[in-house]
Structure formats: structure tokens, C-alpha cells
Amino acid sequence: MSTNTETTADHRLHGKLGPVGVVFMVVAAAAPLTVIGGNMPLAMGLGNGAGAPVGFLIAAAVLLVFSVGFVAMTPYVPEAGAFFSYVTLGLGNRPGSGIAAVALIAYTAIQVGIYGYIGWAIGDTVRFYGGPQIPWPAYSFVILAIVALLGYRHIDLSAKVLGVALVLEISVVVVLDLVIVAKPGPAGVTFASFTPGIFTHGALGIAVLFALTGFIGFEATAVFRDEARNPERTIPRATYAAVLLIGGFYAITCWAFVVAIGPDQVTETAQRTLAGDANMLLDTTDANLGRIGRDVVNVLLLTSLFACVLSFHNVIARYQFALARKGLLPNRLATVHSSHGSPAVSSVVQTVTAAVIVGILAALGVDPLVGVFGSMAGVATVGMVLLMLTTSVAVLVYFARHRSDAAGRTWQTRIAPALACAGLLGSLWLVLTNFTLVTGGSAMLSAILAAIPFVGLVGGALLRRS
């Protein structure tokens, strides 16, 4: 890699991303196919069965309300940095510094978790087609190297790579959904999932929990502010589009799988998937699109995971860049590559950080799914809900102090942020009370992992000098 960079303090990232480009980056981070293959069976098998689509709708509604205040404050936030920038502006430097630490913890955790997942998934695919059995870390480090190369270069390259992967991923699932509706399962095209008697049966809260986990990264629209063509218009449009697209895609596909399998059988099928005796995503695809369709989805699941980890790499690199510009991290991380216009040094540091953590987990022999992905996803989920909750409080405080900016916008600046706080508090309670289901570990281990984002919040605030 070239090290031709500029270190001018006023040098900013630049790019020409429009709403579509930003949405590609964000929706790719949500990894739709990964959520369908992983989160959906969890929501059905451990939650409320055929009523799981409603869990995704509830999660989307909470995040959509959160986005109202988030978008309303965007014009007054002059820099990239997402939650860190919003909380600093609304609540001050110390809370902002604390939330920056939480953001880095959350994003790093989910990225490391995906490295574990993709290492396992590639190995499983290779073995399925008769290839050799190679330890998962070997595949993870190959992917890490490719991500390092793309993340080092201009953001437009990453957006193009993510765009192609995402279009293919969504296209094949849309085709699958349409085929299922055209040739439904034993119960026909049923809307039983949306009746109170169905979606209130079982644990609706657990379905909401795993739905929320599937949205991690949607707010990263604001991280790409400096690289957006017209941030005042691009960021709001991209934020709403990302929430609606992700939420609608999840809910419709989840419903389609209920139609394919049948409301009475879907819970059992999901539980068999969790036990390793079935694969809801691939088996349903095989039944509706044939072996070729199954093979295509299997490959796209891998590209989904790759797109996810590349998107999170870009987000973390830009968080570090923004923090370095504020003096919270070494100035060297604020270096911009003279040719690529990327946060090159920050990207390299992020690569090294991920490599070290993945290496440690691999050396300890941690299981890539339950141990790496499960536990890291748990940490990230707690962190993300905490981030959004604090940001909603910051929106309320900011507009209370700047009443002229809030004039005539009571819904955007008061009511919606207050409703978001209530919804996110409820979501945080759901996550914490069901945390062992997310991590797959003991109560003690789960408590330690759940505490990490809170420790980061306090530690980051205390380390701030003023």
C-alpha cells in the first residue's frame, strides 16, 4: 500500500456519494441475507413463531421515530461522526467522548463477530462441496486482508463493491419471496402473522430484540457526511430510506417464510435450524428455487457477510478519523490520503485492531459462531441501543436550549425524540433481560459482556479533560 498521505489539519474527507450510494453502504452493513439466515430463525424459534414479522415492524417503527429527531438535528451538526458529534453538540464534551468510546466498542465488536461468522461460513461451504477442512481463522484473515485493501482506497470503490453485492443479495431474496407467494405452502397466502392472537403468542420481546440486532449500522449515514454530494439533503433521505428499506425487507421476507412453511410448522422448523438439524434459509430456497437457487443463495450469503464487514470497516475508520480531528485520538489518525481521499492511516489502524482481536480469539480456540459471533453481536446490540438512547436525549436537550431552531417543529424536536427515548428504554430492557439468548453464554459471562459498553461510556467520559 502506498503511504502517500497529507497531514494538513484542515484537510477533510471528500467524495460524491448521493443518497443511493450512502444507502448501499448502510444497508450492506445491516447484511439483509445474514439477518434472514441467522436472526430470523432466532426470532421465530425463541420468540413468537409465526408472529416474528411484527417484531421487525416494531423495531423499524422505533428506529423510524428515532430518525425524526436525528434528522432534525443533522443540519446543526457541522461534522461527520454520527452519534459522537450529536451527543457532543447536545450534551457536551464529556458525554460525547463517552459515547465515542461506546461507538468504537459496538462497531468493533460486530465487525469481529462477522469475521468469525464469515470464517465459519466459508469453511462450511468448502466442506459441503467436498473441499478440505481448514480452520476458520485462515479464511477470516484472507477476508480481513481484502477488506484492508478496499478500505484503504477511495470510498467510491467500496460503495461500488457493496452496491453490486447488495443488489445481487436483495434480488435473489425478492425472487424467492415472489415464488413463495405464487406457490405458497400448506396454509396458502396467509396473513395470520399480523393478527394479535399470533404475534402476541410466545415472546414478542425476543423477536423485537433480534430484529433490533439486524438494524445495527443503519445510523451510519451521518458518518459519511463529508463524502456526501449534498449532506443537508443526502443524509436525511438516506437515513429514512435505510430504515424503511431494511425494515420492510426483513418484515416481508419473514412473512414470506411463514407462508412457505406454514404458521403451524414455522416455529418447529426454526427450532430445528437452531439445533443444527435444518437450515431454514437454504432448505426453503431449495424447495422453491431448486438446488441451483440454493447454491446461489449460499454464495450470496458469503458476499452478504463480506459486504457487512467492509461497511463496518469504513464506518470505524471514519469514527477514528473524526475523533482524531477532535484531539481524542492521536493526530496521525486524522491523516487523509492525497490520492484516494480516504482516512488511510485510520483504516490501517482499524485493520490491525481487528486482526489482533481475531487472532486472540482464534488462539484461545473460541467457537466462531456462538463464541465469536454470538457474544460480539450481544455487545454490539447493547452498545447500539445505548448510543441511540443517548443521542435522542441529546436532541431533546439541544432543541430545548436553541428554541429558535425548534420553532414550528414540535413533532421533530420534542415529541418524536421523547417517544424514541421511551421506545429505546424499552428496547434496552428487552436486550438486557434476554441477553443470554443473544450471547449463548452463561449468566456471568453475559453480564460481563453486557457491561462493556457501559464501562466504555463512563471511561470515555472520565478520560476527557474538559
Image: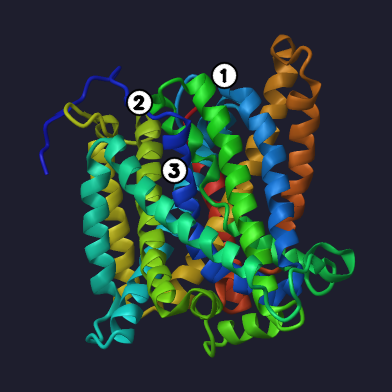
In depth, the one of 337 and 325 nearer the eye is: 337
- Within-10-Å neighbours for mark 3: few <14, some 14–19, many 20+: many
**Would you say 446 lies left or right of 53 here?**
left
Look at the image and tell me whether residue 335 can be seen: yes
**Which residue in the structure is indicated by mark 1?**
75
Depth check: give the residue in front, 403 or 287. 287
Residue drawn where x is 76% and y is 18% of the image: 409
Distance from Cα at disc 1 to Cα at disc 3: 22 Å
Amino acid carrying label 3: it is Phe
What residue occupies the far right of the structure in this picture? 197
Q: Are marks 3 and 2 in contact (CB under 8 Å)?
A: no
Percent x, y for residue 302? 37, 66
Percent coordinates x, y for residue 222 in the rendering: 49, 32
Q: Residue at x 59, y 63 (%)?
A: 177
Residue identifier under label 2: 16
Residue drawn at (30%, 54%), measured in percent from left and top? Answer: 353
In three-dimensional space, the C-alpha distance between marks 1 and 2, rounded to whole angstroms, equals: 18 Å
Report if residue 326 is visible in the image.
no
Above-or-below relation of 23 to 195? above
> Residue placed farthest to the front in the image?
182
| Residue 78 sits above or below residue 142 on the image | above
Residue type at mark 2: give it.
Lys
